[in-house]
Image (cartoon, rainbow, N blue to C red):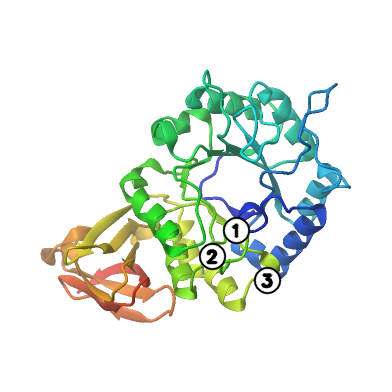
Amino acid sequence: MLIPAPPMGWNTWNTFGANISEALIKAAADRVVELGLREAGYTYIVIDDCWSLRERDPKTHEIVADPAKFPGGLKTLSDYIHGKGLKFGMYSCAGVRTCADYPGSFGHEFLDARTFASFGVDFLKYDYCNVPVSGQAPLLYRRMGQALRACGRDILFSACNWGTEDVGAWIRSTGAHMYRSTGDIADNFKSMSGIATGQIPRLSQSAPHCFNDLDMLTVGMFGKGNVGSSGCTLADYQTQFALWALMGSPLMLGCDPRTMTPEIVQLVTNRGLLRINQDPAGLQAYRVNHCWGNPDCFTLARLLEGGDLALGCFNLSESPCGNLLLLEQLGLTYESGLRLRLVDCFTGEEQHSGRDTVTVPSLPPHGCRVFRCTPVKA
């Protein structure tokens, strides 16, 4: 199955952890549709860890859904989600046990893939806890990759080994469509910004059909949930969403869709940012500069299909900063006779660069500005 653009959806873990149920998943799916998130591209509804009984069925050896949490069974839930025009995602682990100590898929990859296919699964998040000493990450992910290919159903393969064992060097060979290259995110600015800046050297390790996953978004959590910690401000979330969009990460929401504020809905459905994230060319972003020796104030650029490019100016520091970008750093020399028409993705305002520079005079702490840019004659 080909995945030309980063997958988008919602995952249970960040907010709910083990506190999941059939009723919750149905209500979340209903709300995703009601808020217009499906039309914006958020089509995957993914159940994370803690969905099964603690032990496999002693006769069939299959993983069994917890009947207390899912009394109607996962196939019925899958049918409900599909009936909403959405796709159904689930979780397993390459180890003997999952991260929350439920049955993992080690040694049961082909059986589990067939089981997931029988549930109508469209997406599998595959974690990396409790792997035996004899296990090797490339081999274990290839096993599940082959099992999914043989299960008789197209299932998006989301590898999640947190960036260990130089995952970017080999993960595409497993058939994975997206892969985690970071530790787990927490709902605070330090965690989010650290993940983003840590990925800048790895931006080349993402491309159509296998996207580098910066982890599920904490946008809109405001300190509530399973990875709550201190929470973030709306400005922090704007910066997080802009970074994930510009870096081409999958966009998996982690907040509670039932309580999303209008401001958060507006942010995660921002057409300008989503167009950048979902751009058909799928080219990597790159860091252009940092401002006056401040590595936490920098610009990312990304070439887009049709000749446009995206510019994101970010201030991850605790003090205001401005940014001066030389067009030469984008390959546009003075003699090219070109400058940029810039459209602000948040406000829609239009401006033009000079022949040599783009100036962003002041960014507040944790702030950002993102522009869609078109080269035009000076």
Amino acid under disc 3: Thr
Q: Nearer the viewer, residue 264 or 222?
A: 222
Q: Closer to the N terminus: mark 2 or mark 3?
A: 2
* Residue 235 position in % (x across, y down): 45, 74
Q: Name the side, left or right, on which 43 lies relative to 266.
A: right
Amino acid under disc 1: Gly
State the CA–CA distance, disc 1 to disc 3.
12 Å
Q: Residue at x 55, y 67 (%)?
A: 268
* Residue 57 position in % (x across, y down): 82, 27
Locate the C terminus by quadrant.
bottom left
> For residue 367, what is the image quadrant?
bottom left
State the CA–CA distance, disc 2 to disc 3.
12 Å
Residue carrying label 2: 219
Amino acid under disc 2: Val
Q: Nearer the viewer, residue 18 or 154?
A: 18
Residue carrying label 1: 254
Q: Residue at x 61, y 28 (%)?
A: 144
Whether tag 2 and tag 1 are in contact, CB under 8 A, the answer is yes
Q: Closer to the N terminus: mark 2 or mark 1?
A: 2
Q: Closer to the N terminus: mark 1 or mark 3?
A: 1
